Amino acid sequence: MKMTEANNGNSRVIVSPSAGNDIPGIVAVAIANAPGALFRSGWTYLRTKRRARKSSKILAKTMQSNGVPPDVAQKLADKYESDISVSNLMRTIGVPFGKRSKPEEPGK
């Protein structure tokens, strides 16, 4: 069996002509790569959340300095910061997540 090598940017992948028949091997590779992908995704999420928190503070200060009442400015800044969350991200890509994931029954 002849193996070929493909470069997908960051890593080399060995592709076998019978890759479609090698489901256990594909699953093993996916499981082996999952922790790294999860770590990178988590790190990116935390960095984005930190930036949103800093930006919301700047937003609140700027609105207050431009005459917006402090309670209104803080409420808008908090809403801006809370839009960056795992549950909102999951809902955005169409994955049911959290309490609001179930469809509401008519009449309630």
Image (cartoon, rainbow, N blue to C red):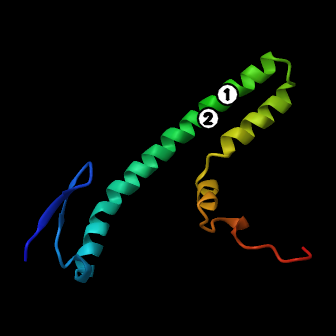
Residue at the far bottom: name it: 21
Whether residue 34 is situated above or below residue 25 in the rendered picture: above
Element class at badge 2: helix
* Mark sitting on residue 53: 2
Residue at the far top: name it: 65
Q: Position of residue 95 (x, y in %)?
A: 59, 67
Q: Callout 2: 10 Å neighbours few (<14), some, many (20+)?
A: some
Residue drawn at (26%, 54%) of the image? 8
Residue drawn at (66%, 65%) of the image? 98
* Quadrant of residue 1 within the rendered picture: bottom left
Element class at badge 1: helix
Whether residue 84 is situated above or below residue 105 in the rendered picture: above
Q: CA gap, disc 2 to disc 1? A: 7 Å
- Which residue corresponds to mark 1? 57
Residue drawn at (78%, 36%) of the image? 76
Q: Position of residue 2 (x, y in %)?
A: 8, 72
Closer to the camera in the image, 2 or 53: 2
Q: Position of residue 72 (x, y in %)?
A: 85, 32
Q: Position of residue 4 (x, y in %)?
A: 13, 65
Q: Are marks 2 and 1 in contact (CB under 8 Å)?
A: yes
* Quadrant of residue 51 within the rendered picture: top right
Q: Is residue 45 left or right of residue 56?
A: left
Under mark 2, the amino acid is: Arg
Q: Is residue 36 left or right of residue 98?
A: left
